[in-house]
Image (cartoon, coloured by chain):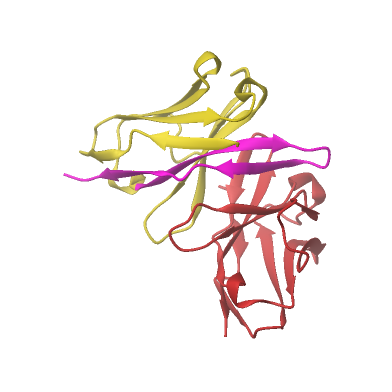
Amino acid sequence: QTVVTQEPSLTVSPGGTVTLTCASSTGAVTSGYYPNWFQQKPGQAPRALIYSTSNKHSWTPARFSGSLLGGKAALTLSGVQPEDEAEYYCLLYYGGARVFGGGTKLTVL
Amino acid sequence: EVQLVESGGGLVKPGGSLRLSCAASGFTFSSYSMNWVRQAPGKGLEWVSSISSSSSYIYYADSVKGRFTISRDNAKNSLYLQMNSLRAEDTAVYYCARDVIAAAGPSFDPWGQGTLVTVSS
């Protein structure tokens, strides 16, 4: 069974920079897995942030960026704001199947 | 406005069945693949199933294969999830999400607000 792994939790100071990563048990993550990133705040449905590694939706703040880093998908937040405190999930496409990562709880402190 | 509204959740006994619905509006439903994603209380997101626009391609997570059936009615702009042989571990909020295929690749957007399924005796 394919497992997608994220850091369980990260803490960042306001105005700081943080990178979340997303690894696949099958090996290096490439653009062919179409990495997606979602943000979820308590009591809300997830919201799409990044698709296909680094593409932003029209509503995605400029401080969010996606990339591939050391065989993993990565989400970098630069100039973190208090409202960025949330759970972040990556999603990888394995042909017809999709697999979410376990999520990273980002605390802004 | 593009909108997805789930319904059909509730309390069901282990071994029982439930059918979830997702009503779509604000877009041409028949042109998009659709997904079901669930989230157990206090846990992360789990992709459950996907169906292509014409129902030609259907995929399931191993955890639900053989018990759940995804379907759609394009004339009614509706997506369904028939859940049989339910287990306690199926307890979750179930979301439907549209599969958007941009030039660069796919994404899930938007998501519905979710419907809670509780499996308990």
Does A107 sit left or right of B69 as displayed? right
Q: Position of residue A2 (x, y in %)?
A: 59, 49
* Residue B20 seen in the current view: yes
Report the residue at 29% width, 41% height from top.
Answer: B87
Q: Main secondary structure of the magenta part?
A: strand
Note the chain letter of the yellow one.
Answer: B
Q: Quadrant of residue A70?
A: bottom right
Does A38 sit left or right of B37 as displayed? right
Note the chain letter of the red one.
Answer: A
Q: Is residue A99 above or below residue B48?
A: below
Report the residue at 62% width, 18% height from top.
Answer: B56
What are the residue bounds of the magenta stretch? B92-121
Q: Quadrant of the C terminus of chain A?
A: bottom right
Report the residue at 24% width, 34% height from top.
Answer: B15
Q: How many numbered circles are shown?
A: 0
Q: Position of residue B120 (x, y in %)?
A: 21, 45
Q: Position of residue A15 (x, y in %)?
A: 71, 83
* Residue A105 seen in the current view: no
Q: Is residue A8 above or below residue A72?
A: below
Question: Residue most toward the left?
Answer: B121
Q: Position of residue B96 (x, y in %)?
A: 50, 38
The answer to if A6 sits in the magenta stretch is no
Question: Residue most toward the top?
Answer: B75
Q: Nearer the viewer, residue B61 or A43?
A: A43
Q: Is residue A107 above or below residue A76?
A: below
